[in-house]
Amino acid sequence: MHTKLENGHPVCIRSITQSDAERMRVGISRMSAQSRYLRFFSGAATPPDWVIERLTEVDGHEHIAWGAVDAADESEPAIGAVHAFRHHEDEDCAEFSVGVLDDYHGLGLGKMLTATILIDARREGLAHFAVNILAENRSARDFAKSLGATYEGLEDGVMQFQLDVEDAIEALRAECDPPGMAEVFNAFEDA
């Protein structure tokens, strides 16, 4: 699906496949050390192969994932990705994560990717997401809370939140920014 960020820049949101491994690896390496640390709890410049394999082994049910590329040059690395890994002990819950390259922070890409995966998760029978956020990651905490996430606890510097899928969809539907958000809802809710 093609849409635009808050600044009008074109992006393509699409499902992630195993063929995206190198695109993901390069994209992650282009994140700042701080962004990699806040997203992966490690600032390593190059993720190990097992991380890339885990991020690209998507089946659409146990692991749902969507990525974004710069539509002005789709041969470039991934600029953002969102994942939901279903919990085996709680079939209607998945671990949620989202990451966006630094150059695209604050432009609504994370919101659009999150809306995409929430809609897909609802279709796959997921009712809530478990969200683990480093306590120092204020922007991620604020984003989770804006979606209605409830605080569950703190362990080893990692805050646990619970996010209701329906409530989060409604919170994002109420957003008027980025302009591409309406396009996301139109494209994915009708799919």
Image: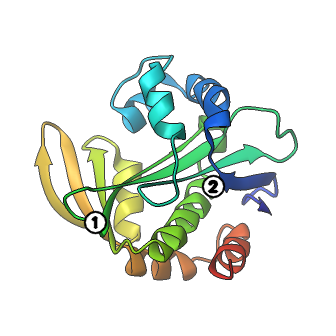
151 shown above or below 56: below
Q: Residue 147 sits in which quadrant? A: bottom left
Question: Looking at the picture, how far across and down is residue 45, in whole percent?
Answer: 50, 17
19 left or right of 155 in image: right
Q: Is residue 127 left or right of residue 5?
A: left
Marks 1, 2: nearer the viewer: 1
The residue at the point 76 percent across, 53 percent down is: 12
Q: Residues within 10 Å of mark 1 (few under 14, many from 20)?
A: few
Q: Which residue is drawn at the image coordinates 65% and 77% (left, top)?
A: 185
Q: Is residue 112 above or below residue 175?
A: above
Residue 64 location in percent, x, y? 49, 56
Circle 1 SS class: loop
Front one among 134 and 113: 113
Left or right: 5 as drawn, with respect to 35: right
Q: Mark 2 highlights which residue?
A: 109
In front of the other: 93 or 11: 93
Seen from this angle, which residue lies furthest right?
A: 72
Q: Quadrant of residue 153?
A: bottom left
Amino acid type, label 1? Glu
Left-right relation of 179 to 93: right
Q: Residue at x 70, y 55 (%)?
A: 13
**Sequence order check, earlier mark of 1 and 2:** 1
Relative to the observer, which residue lies in front, 182 or 91? 91
Residue ID for mark 1: 91
The residue shown at (44%, 36%) is 54
